[in-house]
Amino acid sequence: MEKNNTGMLNALKSVFLREWGRMTSRRIYFGVCVVIPMFILVFMLTIFGNGKIEQLPVGAVDMDNSSTSRNISRNVSAVPTINLQHFADAATAQDELLKGKIYGYFVIPPNFESDVLGMRSPTISYYYHFVFISVGNILMADLTTIFKTIAAAPILQKGEAMGISPDLIMFKLMPVQTHIEKIGNPWLNYELYLSTVFVFVLLQIQILLITVYTIGIELKKRTAHAWLKAANKNVFIAVTGKLLPYTIIFVAEALFFNVVLFVFCNNPLSCSIWQLHGLAVLFVLATQAFGLFIISLLPLLRISISMASLLGSLGATLAGLTFPVEGMPKFIHVMSYLFPIRQFTVIFQTNALWGLGFSYCWQSYALLVAALIPPLFLMFQLKREMIYYNFQEK
């Protein structure tokens, strides 16, 4: 038994050193495994600026051109999220909206000031682009808040002139007050929510591609026999030894990402950094298993690379970052749970942002562990491909 274990370790070492030699012999591996992930980190740390969406171009169509309407435009332009642009008519503003040059616009009708003074309830219409959900929600909330405040101003002025206290007037206008509690991210800082997860969304694409490529290139170049021979014809050792160098590199990068994001950048963290490190390790292993499943099922390199690129790109959507998964069609909702990045996102939000603990996300942990199992059922199919690979790349 001891001799057998020694033989397995020697075979694992042989495959590991063989793959390490292949990695260091071509600069493309260094670029894909090291340079691009570091670029991803720098890019995601700088893209959000101070972490909030600001200076969104919004149009103003002032058809009254009175002191009251100009005061409304000044109030709107004072909002940090809005960069106000003036247009002569609504048709021009609508055209700019459709072209994507502005994200919304509002129209102040003619005779607005005289209607306000005459208590004739004039209407300010506003339109916003909802193709971009985050931007649309922000503009809707900001413009609605501004115009509600403006709408209440004449009533307050008239009530105060009649000797009614402002508090009583506001009670009549808004008998039910709402209180918004921003859980997990009270600063509304998009960097805390998006960049910390998008770093791993982009990293999982790299992991998928390099996993599929390193195995697929052995089949394409017909060097799989030498690879399997180095592993003493044990496909499990062959796969483990080949992927181990990349596992070490990607795990080290994932841990480095955590340190940069939550130690050096001082992003708020509601759980232990070691818990995030454990999650990062499990995420890398599950993503590699996903890539191994793809290449084992589709051993033709060009097809498996295309599939890995497609599924990796879908990760951002199916992680629930750009649109709630619960709002997607049922089939897509169920399919999202097959992606390791979805489980990573759920665990990250539950623990790092909300600090709810393991009991609230144990299912996601279980699914990440379960992701390691499917490739095991395809190992002997992969071994057959390594021995009898007859596909011809065009």
Image: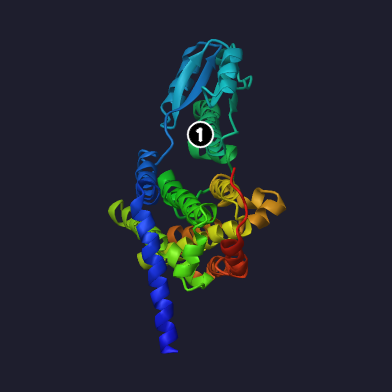
Q: Quadrant of the C terminus?
A: top right
**In the image, what residue occupies the spot 38% across and 71% down?**
13
Q: Is residue 374 visible?
A: no
Residue under the point 53% across and 63% down: 289
Q: Residues within 10 Å of mark 1 (few under 14, many from 20)?
A: some
Disc 1 marks a residue whose amino acid type is Asp
Residue 315: percent from left, percent from top: 55, 50
Q: Is residue 295 above or below residue 141?
A: below
Which residue is at the front of the view, 159 or 118? 118
Front position in the image: 312 or 21: 21
Image coords of residue 285 (percent x, y): 48, 64
Query: Eyeballing the image, is 41 above or below 277?
Result: above
Q: Residue furthest left?
A: 264
Residue bearing the label numbered 1:
142
Q: Secondary structure at mark 1?
A: helix
Image coordinates for residue 269, horizontal then vertical, percent: 38, 59
**On screen, residue 306 above or below 3:** above
Quarter location, residue 117: top right
In the picture, which quadrant includes the N terminus? Answer: bottom left
Name the residue nearer the viewer: 370 or 306: 306
Q: In front: 284, or 191?
A: 284
Q: Residue at point 48% right, 15% down? A: 86
Q: Residue at x 60, y 55 (%)?
A: 299
